[in-house]
Image (tube, coloured by chain):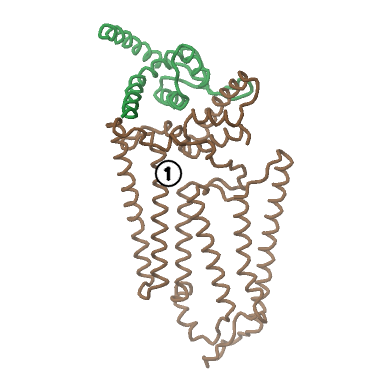
Chain colours: A green, B brown
C-alpha cells in the first residue's frame, strides 16, 4: 500500500514539474550553455533535473524552433551549446506571464 | 575494469537503442556532457572515480533502455519509457517465432513423406503473415501496458520492474574492432540474411529428393546418362550442407545475443576455414575421379568426351580453387595477427574475438 502511495505521489510530482521544466530551461538559456553547465546552473538555482530528462528536452525544444544549437570546441572537447532562438524568446515571454498569473492564483488558493 | 571503459560501454548500449540516423549526434553530446560531469566529480574527489562510484553514478543516470527511450519521438500507442523494451521484445518474439517455424518446416521435410517443394513454397509464402501476427500480438500487449501505466499508475507501480534491478555490470563489452569495409549491419539486414540462409538450407536439403531443384530438366537426363557422379560428390554436397547449417545456427545465435552488427574475426575466420573443407574433400577424391561411366547405361559416351581428361581437368580446377581459398585464409589470418599486434602495442588490450 505504501509503495502504491509513493508511486502515485511520484507520478503527480512529475506531472506538476513537467511544464515547469520547459519554462525553466527556456529561461536559463537566455545565456548560452551546453547540457552539463545548463544542468548545473539550474541546480544552483534550486531546480534539479536528471540528465535523461534534460538532454532529450533540449533536443525537443530545438526541433520546435525554440532553441538554436552550435557544436564548438571548449577545453579540448566538442560540445553542443544551446541558446534561446528569437521564437523561443517570444514563447518564454508568453509562458513567463502565464506562470506569474498562475502563481498568483495558486498563492490565493493554497 | 576502468571507469572510462564502463562509461564507453554505457554509451555503446545507449547508442544501440537510438534511431540510426541520430546515433552519432546524440552520443557525441551525451559523451561531452557525461565526461564533463565525471571530470567535476573527480576534481571534487581529487582522484579518478573508483569502479564502485562509477557504477553508482551510471545507476543514477538510469538503464540505457530508459535513456534512449527519452530521445524517441512521441508515440501514441507506446510511450518512450517502454518503447525500447518493446522493440527488444518484438525482435526476440520475431526471432523465436521464425526459429520455431523454420524447425517445424525442416522437421516436416525431413521426417514426412508428403511435404514437397509445393508445400515448402506455401509455408514460405505464409511466413509474412506469421511475422505480422507476432508483431500485432506484441504491439497489442505493450499498448495495454502503456495504457495501464499511464492511466492507473497507482495500480501498477514499477511496471517496468527491470529498471530497478539494472546494473552497469551487465553492460555488454565494447565492440572495438570493425572489420575493414565492414559497415555494421542493421537488424533488418541481419534478419534478412538469416531468412535467406534458412531458405538456402531448405533448398539444399530438398535437392537429394528433388534433383531438378539444382539441375532443372537436366536431372531426368542425368538419371539415364552414360556418365554418373562418384561417391565423393555426395560427401562434398553434405559438407556444403553442414557448412550452411553451421552458418544458419551461428547467425541465429548472433541475433539472439545481440551481436548481429559486426562479424567478429573468429567467426569470419571460421567461415573461411569451414568453406575450405568441401574443396579439400574434392581434392582428396580417390584417383582424382569425379565422373565415371554409368554401368547401367549402354548408351555410348558422347563423341569427343574422354572421361580421363575430364577428371584430370576437374582435378586441376579443384587444385587451383584450393590454393586460392587457402591463400585467402592465410591472408586473413595474417591481417588478424597484425591487427592484434598493433592493438597490443597501442594499449595492451587484446583484439575482441566475437
Quarter of the image that includes the N terminus of chain A: top left
Residue carrying label 1: B88
Q: In this picture, is B228 found above or below B204? A: below
Across and down, in percent, residue A11 comes to 33, 25
Query: From the viewer's perspective, is B152 left or right of A54?
Result: left
Q: In this picture, is B230 found above or below B1? A: below
Quarter of the image that includes the C terminus of chain A: top left
Residue furthest to the left in view is: A109
> Which residue sits at x=57%, y=75%?
B235
Q: Residues within 10 Å of mark 1 (few under 14, many from 20)?
A: some
- Residue A50, picture quadrant: top left
> Which residue sits at x=36%, y=15%?
A91
Query: From the viewer's perspective, is B268 left or right of A42?
Result: right
- Residue B123, picture quadrant: bottom left
Across and down, in percent, residue B161 comes to 39, 37
Residue furthest to the bottom in view is: B298
Chain letter, disc 1 residue:
B
Depth order, front residue of A56/B37: B37
Residue furthest to the front in view is: A1
Depth order, front residue of B7/B284: B7
Count numbered badges in the picture: 1
> Which residue sits at x=37%, y=76%?
B113
Across and down, in percent, residue B57 comes to 53, 28
Element under disc 1 = helix
> Which residue sits at x=38%, y=60%?
B101
Query: From the viewer's perspective, is B60 left or right of B152?
Result: right
Amino acid at each position: 500500500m505504501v509503495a502504491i502511495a509513493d508511486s502515485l505521489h511520484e507520478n503527480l510530482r512529475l506531472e506538476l514539474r513537467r511544464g515547469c521544466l520547459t519554462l525553466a530551461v527556456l529561461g536559463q538559456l537566455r545565456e548560452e550553455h551546453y547540457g552539463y553547465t545548463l544542468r548545473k546552473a539550474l541546480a544552483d538555482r534550486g531546480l534539479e533535473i536528471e540528465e535523461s530528462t534534460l538532454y532529450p528536452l533540449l533536443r525537443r525544444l530545438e526541433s520546435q524552433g525554440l532553441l538554436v544549437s552550435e557544436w564548438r570546441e571548449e577545453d579540448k572537447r566538442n560540445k553542443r551549446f544551446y541558446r534561446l532562438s528569437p521564437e523561443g524568446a517570444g514563447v518564454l515571454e508568453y509562458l513567463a506571464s502565464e506562470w506569474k498569473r498562475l502563481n498568483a492564483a495558486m498563492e490565493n488558493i493554497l | 575494469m576502468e571507469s572510462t571503459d564502463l562509461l564507453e560501454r554505457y554509451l555503446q548500449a545507449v547508442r544501440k537503442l537510438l534511431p540510426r540516423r541520430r546515433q552519432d549526434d546524440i552520443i557525441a553530446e551525451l559523451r561531452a556532457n557525461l565526461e564533463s560531469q565525471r571530470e567535476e566529480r573527480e576534481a571534487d574527489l581529487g582522484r579518478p572515480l573508483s569502479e564502485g562510484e562509477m557504477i553508482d553514478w551510471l545507476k543514477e543516470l538510469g538503464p540505457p533502455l530508459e535513456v534512449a527511450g527519452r530521445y524517441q519521438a512521441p508515440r501514441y500507442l507506446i510511450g518512450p519509457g517502454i518503447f525500447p523494451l518493446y522493440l527488444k521484445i518484438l525482435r526476440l518474439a520475431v526471432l523465436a517465432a521464425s526459429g520455431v517455424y523454420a524447425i517445424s518446416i525442416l522437421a516436416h521435410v525431413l521426417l514426412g513423406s508428403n511435404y514437397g517443394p509445393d508445400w515448402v513454397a506455401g509455408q514460405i509464402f505464409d511466413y509474412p503473415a506469421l511475422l505480422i501476427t507476432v508483431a500485432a500480438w506484441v504491439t497489442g500487449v505493450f499498448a495495454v501496458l502503456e495504457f495501464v501505466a499511464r492511466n492507473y499508475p497507482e495500480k501498477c507501480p514499477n511496471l517496468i520492474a527491470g529498471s530497478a534491478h539494472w546494473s552497469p555490470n551487465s553492460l555488454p563489452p565494447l565492440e572495438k574492432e570493425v572489420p575493414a569495409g565492414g559497415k555494421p549491419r542493421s537488424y533488418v539486414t541481419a534478419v534478412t540474411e538469416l531468412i535467406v540462409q534458412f531458405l538456402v538450407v531448405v533448398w539444399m536439403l530438398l535437392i537429394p529428393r528433388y534433383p531438378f531443384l539444382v539441375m532443372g530438366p537436366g536431372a531426368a537426363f542425368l538419371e539415364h546418362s552414360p556418365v554418373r557422379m562418384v561417391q565423393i560428390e555426395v560427401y562434398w554436397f553434405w559438407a556444403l550442407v553442414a557448412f550452411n547449417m553451421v552458418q544458419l545456427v551461428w547467425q541465429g545465435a548472433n541475433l539472439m545475443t545481440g551481436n548481429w552488427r559486426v562479424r567478429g574475426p573468429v567467426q569470419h575466420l571460421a567461415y573461411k576455414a569451414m568453406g575450405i573443407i568441401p574443396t579439400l574433400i574434392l581434392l582428396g577424391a580417390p584417383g582424382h575421379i569425379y565422373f565415371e561411366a554409368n554401368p547401367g547405361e549402354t548408351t555410348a559416351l558422347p563423341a569427343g568426351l574422354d572421361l580421363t581428361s575430364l577428371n584430370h581437368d576437374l582435378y586441376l580446377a579443384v587444385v587451383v580453387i584450393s590454393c586460392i581459398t587457402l591463400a585467402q585464409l592465410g591472408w586473413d589470418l595474417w591481417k588478424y595477427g597484425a591487427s592484434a599486434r598493433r592493438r597490443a602495442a597501442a594499449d595492451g588490450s587484446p583484439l575482441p574475438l566475437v
